[in-house]
Image (cartoon, rainbow, N blue to C red):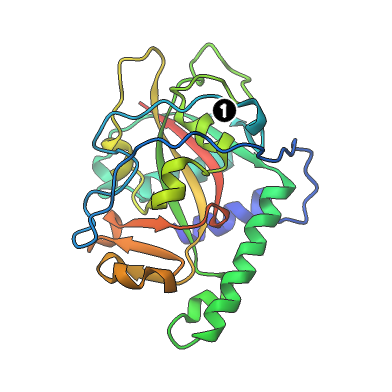
Amino acid sequence: MHALWVFLKDTVNFSCSRKLTDVICEHEKRPRRISCGSIHNSEGEQLLHGLRNPMHRMPYRENYTRSWFYGRLSKDIGDPSRNVIEMIFRAASPCPPRDARRITEVLKVNNSMESLERFEEYRETVKKECFKQHKRHPRGMVDGNELLQFYGATIICCSDKQYGVSDLCKDPNCRVCRIIQSGFKTACNKRAGILMNTSSNAMSEAMNVTTEKNLKRAVILCRVVAGRVCRITDWAQRDDYDSIRSGQNSKLDHLIVRDPSAVLPCFIIVFN
């Protein structure tokens, strides 16, 4: 899977030096604090974001518009880049041969220069911190310990009748647009961290999908600078680390990322 991702990055060029024409917008206000789940320090099983409770609505805010914005990668199933993304999605399933999910759409996130630069600046900061503890964090000195992770969500603006959608919708039930609109800077994320996952379906299956018309499951494929990682059992020492991991099985691990700058959304995968 890592080899496929390296190929894709080289193909579509995720470098910050690439000239982009995305609209850049500063966040002027923060969303109202909303109650969300909590972390059980000892077990780490109740992991944030209300995954086991109905999802709260996240209102559209004009001042957030297009700090990141997404557009379709391709409508053609045979597109090489889409094929790679689908292979990564399948390979990240706990049981790939039995994965019956049907991918209906793949969208590419067009990150602004501001977002790319913020991501790379955060990586350099993490690398410097890892260098101070180079024996404990050798990988962090190289690339900040970059990982490929999934963020579970739902999407409502990607129906068959809406081909060509390239902007954020305003529906509060569309979690994909709301999380990209805020740059992962939601009240829950700020308080408890951003919950990522190594598996492509562990989080999406836990998301409660309502009967809202056109609501579909989705995962956001992200590049994550994990930096110095500690286990949930070392929660008391969390201030000395950049992210926290929970889970014994590597394919079911949760990664709690503390800084939104460490997360760069790349693709949105919509499935039935």
Secondary element at tag 1? loop
Q: Quadrant of the N terminus?
A: bottom left
Q: Height in image: 16 above or below 69?
A: below
Task: Estimate the x, y position of residue 13 in percent, counting from the top left.
Answer: 69, 52
Seen from the viewer's position, the closer of residues 208 and 55 is 55
Give the quadrant of residue 201.
top left
Q: In the rendered image of this protein, does residue 60 appear above or below residue 228?
A: above
Front residue of this view, candidates 64 and 18: 64
For the point 65% across and 51% down, which residue is it? 11
Characterize the local packing of mark 1: few (<14), some (14-19) or many (20 or more) Cα atoms within 10 angstroms. Answer: few
Residue found 67% across the figure and 38% down from its top: 28
Q: Position of residue 167 (x, y in %)?
A: 64, 25
Q: Position of residue 121 (x, y in %)?
A: 67, 63
Left or right: 253, with 164 as reference point: left
Visible residue check, residue 142: yes
Report if residue 195 is visible in the image.
no
| Amino acid tagged 1 | Asp
- Name the quadrant of the C terminus: top left
| Count of numbered badges drawn on the protein | 1
Mark 1 — residue? 76
Vertical placement of 211 versus 130: above or below? Answer: above
In depth, the one of 192 and 155 nearer the eye is: 192
Q: Position of residue 189 (x, y in %)?
A: 44, 47
- Position of residue 164 in the picture relative to residue 269 (left or right): right
In the displayed structure, does residue 186 sit left or right of residue 120? left
